[in-house]
Image: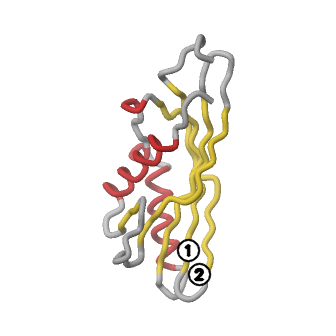
Amino acid sequence: MLRLPNNALQKALIKLLKEKMQGVSVYDFVPIEATPPYITLGSIVVTDQSTKTEDNYKVDMQINIWSEYEGRYEINHIAQQVISLLCSPDGYMDLSADGFAMYRAKIDTYEAYPEDGDGYNGAITYEVHLKNTKANADDI
């Protein structure tokens, strides 16, 4: 594993969601004045999938949706919008400026559950496969 893709992917995903998810705020850091519904990024797990000639990664990112709506409708509706976006051509993220290329992505899981107190949390696990375009066979 030569370079972590976390920051490049997180930056691109937040930018994409902010541009495409109208009416739902997206945060890297949730300000105190934030009001649900909003989207944050949760855990990020990077797995090295390099070969003898390529520096590749599998990244599992959790996308969290927060809602104070009393039922699951709002959470599920927003999750469907996020999933539809990420599974469409509009969901492709150009990471070339940061030296990475996305070559495969999919939604792995979605879960919605009540929070202690009010509302619901929805968690989408987004699996992205990346190549480090700044590496060559001699680096590996």
What residue lies at 35% left-to-right and 51% top-to-bottom? 15
| Spot occupied by residue 38 in the image (x, y as percentages of width and height) | 42, 70
Q: Extreme top residue here? A: 138
Q: Secondary structure at mark 2?
A: loop
**Quadrant position of residue 58:** top right
What residue lies at 50% left-to-right and 57% top-to-bottom? 83
- Considering only vertical position in the picture, is 88 above or below 77? above
**Residue closer to the observer: 132 or 83:** 132
What residue lies at 37% left-to-right and 78% top-to-bottom? 35
The amino acid marked with disc number 1 is Asn
- Considering only vertical position in the picture, is 57 above or below 51? below
The amino acid marked with disc number 2 is Glu
| Spot occupied by residue 26 in the image (x, y as percentages of width and height) | 38, 63
Mark sitting on residue 121: 1
What residue lies at 60% left-to-right and 25% top-to-bottom? 55
Q: State which quarter of the image contains the C terminus.
A: top right
Q: State which quarter of the image contains the N terminus.
A: top right
**Residue closer to the observer: 88 or 68:** 68
* Horizontal relation, residue 121 to residue 52: left or right: left
Q: Secondary structure at mark 1?
A: strand
Separation (CA) of disc 1 from disc 2? 6 Å
* Horizontal relation, residue 108 to residue 26: left or right: right
- Considering only vertical position in the picture, is 56 above or below 74? above
| Spot occupied by residue 111 in the image (x, y as percentages of width and height) | 63, 68
Q: Are marks 1 and 2 in contact (CB under 8 Å)?
A: yes
The residue carrying mark 2 is 115
**Quadrant position of residue 94:** top left
- Considering only vertical position in the picture, is 19 above or below 137? below
